[in-house]
Amino acid sequence: MPDDSRIKVVLKRYRKEEQYFDASMELTDVSVDLLRDACRYEKEDFSARPRELDGKAQAFLSTHIGMDFDEMLFDYFLHPYVRNEFVSTYYKDPSVKVRPTPESGPPTNMPLPAGMHWVAVRPKDGKEQFIGVRDEG
């Protein structure tokens, strides 16, 4: 599966049992094929939803990209997102078969009261989760 520049993959670290991630990084130089190999996932829809990295995936990525993981304290998830600048066209593209969440939060058909914004939290049952929080200030 070729990489799609409209989709970004973010590695997020969550303390065990916590809902909010405490660190994240976009994996700009890591191919989707390498990530799929790390997760031992063969289907074409790899970028459709968040994926938790188990010990084998963490070891694989540690070897291939030189990143250290602490699986005793943290859980790690790969989060695919449609980049903000492509949201308006991506979902209308008939060739698109994989539909990850927009990076700015859930689709706009989910209203949010004024003075609030979406924050991603730990995925549940393989699905991206967001909660609305009050804007600071």
Image: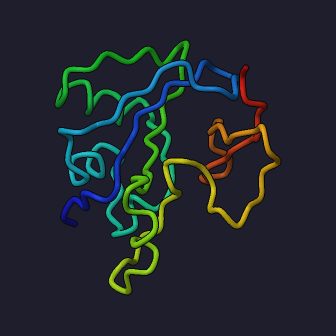
Q: Is residue 104 left or right of residue 125?
A: left
Image quadrant of residue 120?
A: top right
Judging depth in this view, the residue of 30 and 96 nearest the camera is 96
Q: Position of residue 4 (x, y in %)?
A: 25, 61
By what rule are the colours in the image chosen?
Answer: rainbow
* Residue in the image at 62% along x and 43% along y: 123
Q: Position of residue 99 (x, y in %)?
A: 47, 68
Q: Quadrant of the C terminus?
A: top right
* Residue in the image at 26% along x and 33% along y: 60
Q: Position of residue 33 (x, y in %)?
A: 22, 54
Q: Position of residue 112 (x, y in %)?
A: 78, 51
Q: Is residue 75 left or right of residue 54?
A: right
Image quadrant of residue 42?
A: bottom left
* Residue in the image at 31% along x and 59% along y: 6
Judging depth in this view, the residue of 89 and 54 nearest the camera is 89
Judging depth in this view, the residue of 84 and 70 nearest the camera is 84
Image quadrant of residue 57?
A: top left
- Indicate whether 72 appears above or below 127: above
Q: Is residue 58 left or right of residue 49?
A: left
